[in-house]
């Protein structure tokens, strides 16, 4: 009974954060994606996710216990900036070969979120939802950082190809995001900490995925 209850709590948490990502990407699109940079879009995602998670924790929602437990705790406001600066340094150091090869980029966003973006070197093949083997080392590095230091969540944002109908773009974007999420789960990241959402109307129809690493902040 208790195990079923815990699974239900985690499922609700994943759904909630997925909705946050969905609405945030919708706002980004409505605000004119052609004029929105990766940093601005990622900042919107990070900020919205942080606000929702903060509200859960501040109001003592029972879902907070499952999320904080999965993340190994939460950060107080005074420590967030330093903690995420250090995580950026960890990622940049571990991903130096991939960054130098132009395979990924790492940015710090507002609200101290981090954005890791796939490039054309490691993006999905056209019409495929199979993770490019060249991107797996990046995923392993991120999973290791999240598992080692905790106190963060990951939002996976899938982008479509520049082909097909709107329904087909939505399907492939969702499948790509979910494929990356499943990779993280296989690398030991807690399901409660990883959400996946497609972004079918993205101006970047180049088969990429973006990963927003968001600090989990206590009241």
Image (cartoon, rainbow, N blue to C red):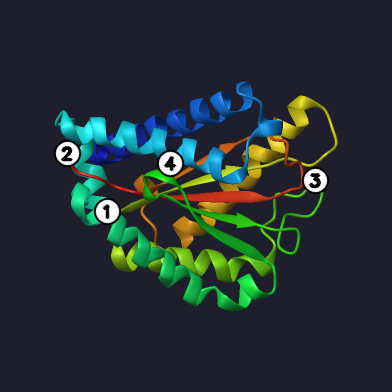
The CA distance from mark 4 to mark 1 is: 13 Å
- The residue sitting at 38% across, 30% down in the picture is 16
Q: Is residue 15 left or right of residue 66?
A: right
The quadrant of the rendering that contains the N terminus is top left
Classify 102 as above or below 178: below
- Given contact means CB atoms under 8 Å apart, are the residues at marks 2 and 1 in contact? no
Residue where numbered disc 1 is placed: 80
Can residue 200 be seen by looking at this rendering? no
Q: 68 left or right of 163? A: left
Can residue 180 be spotted in the picture?
Answer: yes
Q: Between disc 4 and disc 1, whose residue precedes? A: 4
- SS assignment at label 3: loop
Residue 217 in which image quadrant? top left
Q: What element carries label 2?
A: loop
Which residue in the rendered view is the most extreme toward the right? 163
Residue linked to disc 3: 127
Tell me which numbered mark, 1 or 3, is placed earlier along the sequence. 1
Question: Which residue in the structure is indicated by mark 4?
Answer: 46
From the viewer's perspective, is the residue at label 1 or at label 3 nearer? 1
Earlier along the polypeptide chain: callout 4 or callout 2?
A: 4
Give the quarter of the figure containing the C terminus.
top left
- Could you tell which of marks 3 and 2 lies nearer the N-terminus? 3
Q: How far is mark 4 from mark 3, CA to CA?
A: 28 Å
Q: Which of marks 4 and 3 is nearer the N terminus?
A: 4
Q: Distance between the residues labelled 3 and 2?
A: 43 Å
For marks 1 and 3, give the CA distance: 39 Å
Question: Which residue is the site of mark 2?
Answer: 219
**Depicted 190 relative to depicted 103: above or below:** above
Q: Nearer the viewer, mark 3 or mark 2?
A: 2
Q: Is residue 47 above or below residue 194?
A: above
Where does residue 80 sit, x and y in percent of width and height?
A: 27, 53
How many residues crowd mark 4 within 10 Å: few (<14), some (14–19), many (20+)? many
């Amino acid at each position: 009974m208790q195990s079923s209850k815990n699974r239900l709590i985690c499922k609700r948490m994943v759904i909630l954060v997925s909705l946050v990502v969905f609405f945030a990407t919708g706002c980004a699109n409505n605000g004119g994606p052609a004029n929105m940079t990766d940093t601005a879009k990622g900042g919107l995602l990070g900020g919205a996710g942080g606000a929702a998670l903060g509200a859960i924790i501040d109001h003592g929602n029972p879902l907070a216990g499952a999320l904080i437990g999965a993340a190994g705790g939460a950060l107080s406001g005074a420590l967030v900036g330093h903690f995420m600066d250090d995580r950026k340094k960890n990622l940049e150091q571990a991903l130096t070969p991939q960054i130098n090869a132009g395979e990924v980029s790492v940015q710090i966003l507002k609200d101290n979120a981090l954005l890791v973006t796939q490039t054309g070197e490691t993006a999905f093949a056209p019409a495929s939802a199979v993770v490019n083997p060249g991107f797996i080392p990046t995923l392993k590095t991120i999973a290791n950082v999240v598992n080692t230091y905790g106190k963060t969540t990951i939002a996976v944002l899938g982008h479509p190809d520049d082909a097909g109908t709107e329904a087909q773009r939505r399907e492939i974007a969702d499948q790509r995001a979910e494929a990356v999420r499943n990779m993280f789960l296989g690398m030991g990241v807690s399901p409660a900490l990883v959400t996946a959402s497609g972004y079918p109307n993205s101006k970047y129809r180049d088969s990429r995925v973006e990963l927003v690493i968001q600090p989990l902040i206590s009241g």
